[in-house]
Image (cartoon, grey):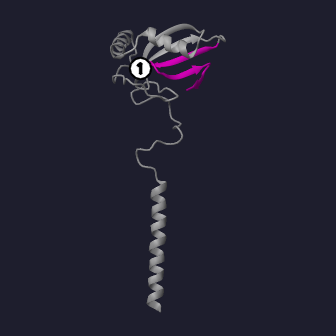
Amino acid sequence: MRKRTIATLATTTVLALGVVGTTAVAETPPPSAKPSTPPASSPKTESGSDKQEPSYTGSIQAPKGTTGENDVNEANESAALAALAKISETDARNAALARFPGATIQKASLGDENGSVVWEVQLTDANKAAQEVKVDAGNGAILAVEAGGAETE
């Protein structure tokens, strides 16, 4: 009788540890998982460039080290990004106008945002509200819209 009790306790303990161990493994995210809330740290990336919110990824990756702080580096960056862009400034403007019919475009510029080559089109919509439209330089898709400081997709 005593051997049976010990065997039952041992089996119960093994099963209990197995369930607890399985639960702990199931609740532990894999190392590659992103946290559900963004970190409260500075919006600068390791290279010192600004991290854009909302986070998006374009179809063309910008070359590393294109962020320049002086006129020469900015010219080099512009040339490198222009060589990668598959759509023209006119195409980017047309994509923004398709999203905001009746808008007036203020300016458009090619840049490196979130590590992607993106056209940034600044415009005033039909309601006279300022809008900033991020257009993928590879395929012309609208990646994000920023209106009056609030960012939307």
Tell me, yes or no, whether the highlighted magenta stretch contains residue 87. no
Q: Give the position of the C terminus as an image quadrant.
A: top right
Q: Residue at x 38, y 16 (%)?
A: 68
Q: What residue occupies the far right of the structure in this picture?
A: 127
Label total for image:
1
Q: Nearer the viewer, residue 117 or 35?
A: 117
Query: Which residue appears at 45% of the width and 50% of the height?
Result: 29
Residue extent of the magenta highlight: 129-153
Picture coordinates of residue 37 (x, y %)?
A: 54, 40
Picture coordinates of residue 26, whole percent (x, y): 47, 56
Q: Is residue 45 left or right of residue 148?
A: left
Residue 114: quarter of image: top left
Q: Please tell me in which quadrant of the rendered image residue 119 appears.
A: top left
Whether 141 is among the magenta residues is yes
Give how far across and how far down residue 132 sits, in percent. Answer: 55, 16
Q: Say which residue label 1 marks.
A: 139
User: How many residues crowd mark 1 within 10 Å: few (<14), some (14–19), many (20+)?
Assistant: some
Q: Hey, what amino acid is under mark 1?
A: Asn
- SS state under label 1: loop
Q: Position of residue 103 (x, y in %)?
A: 59, 9
27 up-or-down from 102: above or below:
below
Q: Residue furthest bottom?
A: 1
* Predominant SS along the magenta part: strand
Residue nearest the viewer, comparing 65 with 30 = 30
Q: Is residue 116 above or below residue 20?
A: above
Residue drawn at (46%, 69%) of the image: 17
For image coordinates 49% across by 26% down, the residue present is: 52
Asked if residue 6 is positioned above or below residue 148 in the image, the reply reads below
